[in-house]
Amino acid sequence: APADAPVIWLMFRQHSWESGTSWAGDGAMRFLLGDSAEADQLRKQFNWKVFPVADPDGIEIGGVRFNVNGYDLNRNWDNIDPKLMPEIAAQHGAIERWLKQGGRIDFFLSLHNTETSEYVEGPADKRALVDLFRRNLTAVSNFEETRAEPQYAAVSSTPGMKGRMTVNQGLYADFQIPAMLMESRVSRHPKLGGRFRSIEDWQAFGAGIIRAAAAAVSGKGL
């Protein structure tokens, strides 16, 4: 894509035990890098940037959501210490350098797993983009919103307390980019006939994320 094309930035496996996000990332990249005419057009129309494994040490040691120093990698985005949380420092630094060099970020998403909830949250003043992405994802994938009302991110997960900002909260606070966080369920899924997502289901979900994000950034419904 041209250098001035819209930029979509994706983050997977921010918490090591949320392995479904890696399979979704695998499906997303297989689709995006594939030989289809649709994928070719998406590569020509958008610049794609990806953090494929945001918690490498946690995966290596079989961790949960904390790095080897005991810090939650989806908190502390307002209190970054490069020695104690090098993962956050590296990811935040990459985004900061990109923006300082004149780059743009039109869409940012960090994908997570939880037990029974499924939702997307993002900045309240970006709600048109957040809502369009959520509707698109529902239309083209096995995503199913579990909250009756749209979810918009608070300033912090614990306002007034240092070290409690999530990735989307921190990136919005620092750079005002449309940063979102998605939870995807690992329990039995009603949209799949009450069964668990298989690897193939997660991969299809990842391809859906690519389609839904690209359309949302273009202002299109699916």
Image (spheres, grey):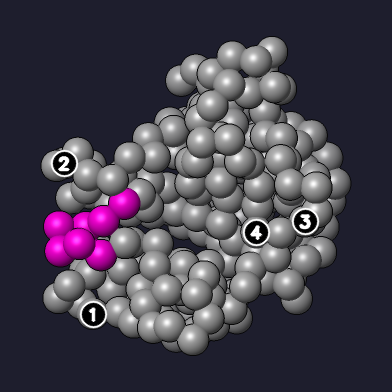
| Disc 2: which residue | 60
| Disc 4: which residue | 121
Work out which quarter of the rendered image holds the N terminus and state it. bottom right
**In what element is the residue under mark 3?**
loop
131 horizontally vs 122: left or right: right
| Disc 3: which residue | 150
- Give the residue type that dot 3 points to: Pro
Label whose residue precedes the other's in the sequence (3 or 2)? 2
CA gap between label 4 and label 3 equals 8 Å
Residue 40 % position (x, y)? 60, 38
Front-most of residues 105 and 54: 54
In reply to whether residue 68 is colored magenta, the answer given is: yes
Q: Residues within 10 Å of mark 1 (few under 14, many from 20)?
A: few
Please report the residue visible at 36 percent of the width from the left and 73 percent of the height from the top. Answer: 76
Residue 55 % position (x, y)? 28, 52
> Magenta segment, which residues?
65-71
Front-most of residues 193 and 9: 193
| Disc 1: which residue | 81
